[in-house]
Image (cartoon, grey):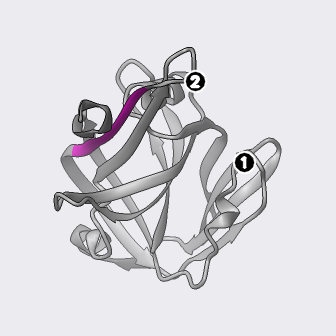
């Protein structure tokens, strides 16, 4: 199961407000730790791209994600290189639900990353599994409804390689949370 999160970060310390799209699926490490692995993250913030990629090892790329309200429909979009690579839709606030329902499929609040950075000569410098979790989460509202997802080809944003077999459901939630520093779960080069 793959989830697409498109959200607006209103007040991010050091970086400011920006939109981000996070494509993720549930993952479990051999040591039993679990969370969400993100093969693609797109955001409209140079600082956010650099910080997430270089510090946390997240595969962030610059794009133009947006969440728009069009009458009785919410439309999530990710545009990269002038191509709408992701379009999602869901009805506007259709069914109120307990926020715990969002974690029914996997814990998206814990992000797992493969941080891979090479030395200047191409030799591996860093090969780590890192983790970062949302803390101080206060959900103000949470809604569920049906969803549509459309993916379009783009060589620089190949999300179309994750085919949509059947959209299960959509959640719209508004919350406050803290992005904390992460931790190294496993260091491949320390062996």
Image-based side of 116 in relation to 108, left or right: right
Report the magenta stretch's main SS: strand
Instruction: Give me the residue at 55% from left, 77% from top.
Output: 147
Mark nearer the N terminus (2 vs 1): 2
* Magenta-drawn stretch contains 126: yes
Q: In which quarter of the image is the N terminus?
A: bottom left
Residue 186 placement (x, y as % from top left): 24, 41
Assign a secondary structure to mark 2.
helix
Residues shaded magenta: 125-134
Q: How far apart are marks 2 and 1 (CA)?
A: 16 Å
Image-based side of 56 in relation to 151, left or right: left
Instruction: Give me the residue at 80% from left, 41% from top.
Output: 81
Quarter of the image holding residue 94? bottom left
Q: Residues within 10 Å of mark 2 (few under 14, many from 20)?
A: some
Disc count in the image?
A: 2
In this view, 186 is above or below 138: above
In this view, 88 is above or below 175: below
Q: Residue 46 carries which label?
A: 2
**Residue occupied by mark 1:** 79
Assign a secondary structure to mark 1.
strand
Q: Residue furthest right?
A: 82
* Magenta-drawn stretch contains 42: no
Instruction: Give me the residue at 38% from left, 71% from top.
Output: 143
Instruction: Give me the residue at 24% from left, 45% from top.
Output: 133
In this view, 7 is above or below 17: below
* Residue toward you, 17 or 104: 104
Image-based side of 67 in relation to 127, left or right: right
Q: Which residue lies furthest to the top in this view?
A: 120
Residue 157 placement (x, y as % from top left): 69, 49
* Residue toward you, 78 or 98: 78
Residue 58 placement (x, y as % from top left): 45, 39
* Residue toward you, 183 or 180: 183
């Amino acid at each position: 199961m793959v989830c697409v999160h498109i959200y607006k970060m209103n007040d991010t310390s050091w970086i400011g407000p920006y939109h981000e799209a996070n494509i993720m699926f549930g993952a479990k490490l051999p040591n039993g730790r679990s969370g969400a692995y993100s093969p693609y993250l797109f955001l409209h913030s140079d600082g956010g791209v650099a910080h997430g990629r270089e510090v946390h090892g997240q595969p962030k790329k610059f794009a133009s994600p947006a969440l728009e309200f069009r009458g009785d429909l919410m439309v999530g979009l990710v545009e990269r290189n002038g191509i709408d690579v992701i379009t999602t839709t869901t009805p506007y606030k259709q069914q109120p639900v307990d926020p715990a329902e969002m974690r029914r499929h996997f814990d998206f609040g814990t992000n797992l990353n493969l941080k891979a950075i090479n030395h200047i000569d191409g030799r591996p410098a860093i090969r780590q599994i890192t983790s970062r979790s949302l803390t101080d989460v206060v959900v103000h509202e949470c809604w569920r409804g049906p969803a549509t997802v459309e993916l379009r080809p783009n060589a620089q944003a190949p999300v179309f390689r994750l085919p949509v077999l059947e959209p299960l459901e959509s959640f719209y939630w508004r919350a406050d949370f803290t992005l904390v520093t992460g931790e190294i779960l496993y260091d491949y080069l320390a062996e």
